[in-house]
Amino acid sequence: MEDEKKQKEEEKQQRKALKENKKASKERLERRWKEVCATHKAAVVEWAAECERLRGMGMAVKDLPRKPKRPLKASLEEKDEEDESKSESDEE
């Protein structure tokens, strides 16, 4: 009886710790995503200004530079997972 209660309590603590780690990781990812979106938005504004300048000089639309691409959120998740695995291996 006592062993079962201890085991259940330990499992509960492990689930709680896992949930907290997952929440912290998700918050970190959201902050990083907002940074990436802000950086991309600034790059698009610069691109638009450059295109306006080039069009004013008479450059054809087909010759204008391409719009900057925004990275996918999935690529940020992969980087975040790689960083976590590296930090875990460093601790060992």
Image (cartoon, helix red, strand yellow):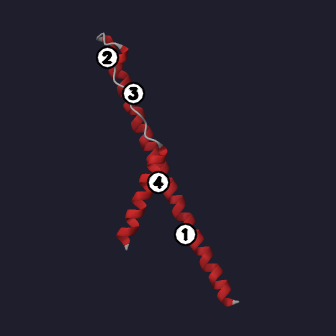
* Residue ID for mark 3: 67
State left or right for residue 71 relative to residue 20: left
State left or right for residue 32 relative to residue 1: left
Instruction: Say if 9 sits above or below 27 in the image.
Output: below
The answer for how far apart the CA atoms under marks 4 and 3 are is 28 Å
User: Residue 33: x percent and y percent?
Assistant: 46, 45
Front-most of residues 35 and 68: 68
Lower sequence index among marks 1 and 3: 1
User: Residue 15: x percent and y percent?
Assistant: 59, 70
* Residue ID for mark 2: 53
Lower sequence index among marks 3 and 2: 2
* Residue ID for mark 4: 28
Label for residue 17?
A: 1
Are the residues tagged 2 and 4 within 8 Å (C-beta)?
no
The answer for how far apart the CA atoms under marks 1 and 2 are is 54 Å
SS label for mark 3: loop
Lower sequence index among marks 1 and 4: 1
Q: Residues within 10 Å of mark 4 (few under 14, many from 20)?
A: few
Amino acid type, residue under disc 1 in the picture = Ala
Quadrant containing the N terminus is bottom right
Lower sequence index among marks 1 and 2: 1
Q: Nearer the viewer, mark 3 or mark 2?
A: 3
Amino acid type, residue under disc 4 in the picture = Arg
Q: Nearer the viewer, mark 4 or mark 3?
A: 3
SS label for mark 1: helix
The answer for how far apart the CA atoms under marks 3 and 2 are is 15 Å
Residue 4, quarter of the rendered image: bottom right
Lower sequence index among marks 2 and 4: 4
The answer for how far apart the CA atoms under marks 1 and 3 are is 43 Å
Tell me which residue sits at (54%, 59%) in the image: 23
